[in-house]
Image: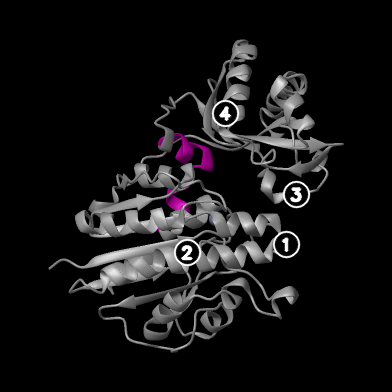
Amino acid sequence: MPMKYAIILPDGAADEPIEALGGRTPLEAARTPNVDWISATGRQGCVVTIPRAFSPGSDVATLSLFGYDPHTHYCGRAPLEAAARGIEVGPEQLVFRCNLVTIVDDVMEDFTAGHISQREADVLIAELNTRLNGKRVTFHRGISYRNLMVAFDATMANLQCTPPHDIPHQAVAEHLPRGTGAEWVLDLMRQARAILAEHDVNHVRRDLDENPATDIWLWGQGRPKPMQAFAERFGVRGAVIAAVDLVRGIARTVGMDVIDVPGATGFLDTDYAAKGRAAVETLESYDLVIVHIEAPDEAGHLGDAAEKVLAIERIDEHIVGPVLAALRTCDRWRILVAPDHPTPVGQRVHTRTPPPFCMAGEGITALLKRPFSESASAESDLQIERGHELMEYFLRA
Ligand SMILES: [Zn+2]
């Protein structure tokens, strides 16, 4: 019998002690009997998902957790998201993440433009394509505020851009693109601002007291880099369940199947139970299922401790629980729970503190026998310095 594996990635779930939670972290405060069972009967530790040379983005951290060294494989966030959308990026082209954002008085008020609806985002992206079509760029629709732009001329290779979720409520002036091609990007952003300012979608959003999409924010640029197929690298056939394009794109780039789940939104309102059911079904036809849930990260960015606790509890009940139950009916199985990085509610941005993980199953003997938490994991002997080795350890050790 081949081993069955499940990996649960609660994005940004790691945190720091929060006063409003009685000095506990959201992972500690949340009721998570299933994750606690995994950590108490198996092992927990910490993993360096963000190598020193990189900033703490989900792109770098998730590459590490998929078992690919960012030093070798990192090519920027946008090319991975383009892969998820099936967008071809030519060798002379450069693809950018294009957020729809709300900037008020030169301050990054909201990097999601009020989590703008899909329909409204689609209309704005189409309008930008029509009005800026002389600029040798193409805008591509993504999910809500997370869109893409392909520039036909990739001579801007030395451009430094800042993720807009790294500068909440900060003045944007110090964080505008710098380096080769910065002027060109800034000019594009200015022209987009003029187009968006007068658009009906934004008039309606203002009337309804919702954040308008005042600007596009270009970042995460890069060109696609091929990666060795996961099945070839690890000898395990896997499928991925994820709502966000970044994780879907990593999966596609390494040749894994992506399972669509109706109701999976990449936000707090995602259908957790639907993802749990899909994961259980996927395990029937694949040896590995990876389930990514964006909600804890979004709650962290919102600075909302209660929502973060709720997201973690729902993941435990509706995803970890059913997956664990299904695995335990198999002869041979292992499960791993691993947040990609902390998104502390108190800071509302990602940090580079190595996040905790826990795993259980065949051949994994109990170490600490404690519930899953950041502090217990930090005390464990199991500290993985090179994050991409965790996958190897989990699948083969
Ligand atoms: Zn993340």
Secondary structure, mark 3, is: loop
Q: Residues within 10 Å of mark 4 (few under 14, many from 20)?
A: few
Residue 214 screen position, x and y as percent: 75, 30
- 156 magenta-colored: no
The boundaries of the magenta stretch are 66-83
Q: Is ligand 1 less than 8 Å from the beta carbon at label 3?
A: no
Q: Earlier in the sequence, mark 1 or mark 4?
A: 4
Q: What residue is pinned by disc 4?
A: 119
* Residue found 43% across the figure and 51% down from its top: 72
Q: Which amino acid type corresponds to the residue marked 3 in the rendered image? A: Pro
Report the residue that reaches farthest toward the top: 134
Q: Quadrant of residue 88?
A: top left
Q: What residue is pinned by disc 3?
A: 168
Secondary structure, mark 1, is: loop
Q: Nearer the viewer, residue 209 or 238?
A: 209
Q: Earlier in the sequence, mark 1 or mark 2?
A: 2
